[in-house]
Image (cartoon, rainbow, N blue to C red):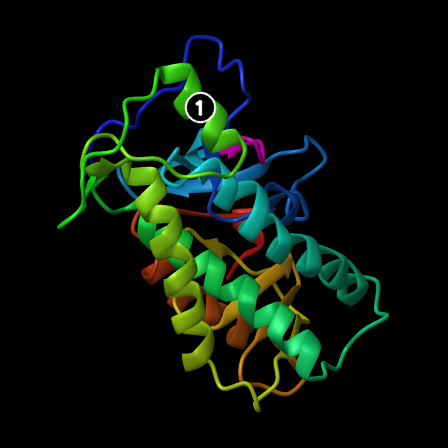
Amino acid sequence: MSRFEKPQKGNPHRLAVAQHTFPSKSIARFCGSDRRVEMFHMQGAVVRRAKPTDRVFCARRAWDHGTEVGFMKEIEDRFQPLAQSIVDGHVSTFDRELTHVISSFFALWVVRTEMREQPVEDAVLQGVLPGRAWSRDQEERLEKAGLGFQRGITIPARQANGIGLRIRVGRLLREINPSASWGVVRASGGEFVVPDRPAYPFIPIEPTLALAHPAMNQTLDRIAVGLVNQQLRSASPHYYFARDLAACP
């Protein structure tokens, strides 16, 4: 992967640089008493404790600021209160609107993890006149305002990725059956791990609670939890984490 483009020294416009693929609020629900999760790194088989803000959970300016604080934040802001209501036991069935909220979050998670792995390359525009020259500060002001810009006949990779990300989220949403609901899955024995890349429509919410699609509400014993975790681990190319890996069969 190419090196990401750093903002100006000191990042004066506070542009999004460390971009979570799985939200820090979601990671925080798996934290132990030290406010960290336990992480297993596939390379080297290393286990360590990590804060939800750890860079390992983030892409590095892979998409533009406007996509991060606009499109993505809207999806997360709809999902997080729902997730907390599920944890609190206030919601266990989902109508069409809530199904869309969950599916949108899952699609966003999938696409962000895919985009994190892709090369960072500027997009070359065909059949257009070169754009005006902007200073570095002007470019960053435009990005902060959610506006795009050209550099000659190219646009920055993160800007192209922001556009592509929105398209791919919409495409994946159309592939997820909207008539089939998500189910609440609880673990009666053991805890769930969280993969760095989702293997299938399964969203861990907290150590013993997850959402699955399509599924009915159900409780899994320790053996079933182990089978689920096996799939989640095998789908993780870089790492997976949990509240306590020793508690995950």
- Residue at the image position 42 percent from the left and 20 percent from the top: 138
- Residue at the image position 54 percent from the left and 19 percent from the top: 13
> Which of the two residues, 98 or 232, is positioned nearer the viewer here?
98
* Residue 200 horizontal/vertical position (percent): 42, 72
> Relative to 149, is 78 on the left or the right?
right
Give residue 217's quadrant in the image.
bottom right
Instruction: Tell whether position 52 is magenta.
Output: yes
* Residue 247 horizontal/vertical position (percent): 58, 54
* Residue 82 horizontal/vertical position (percent): 74, 63
Indicate the amino acid at tag 1. Glu
Q: Is residue 111 visible?
A: yes
Q: Which residue is mark 1?
A: 140
* Residue 52 horizontal/vertical position (percent): 58, 36
Q: Quadrant of the N terminus?
A: top left
> Relative to 118, is 232 on the left or the right?
right
On screen, residue 247 above or below 28 = below
On screen, residue 43 above or below 9 = below
Q: What segment carries the magenta color?
A: 49-53
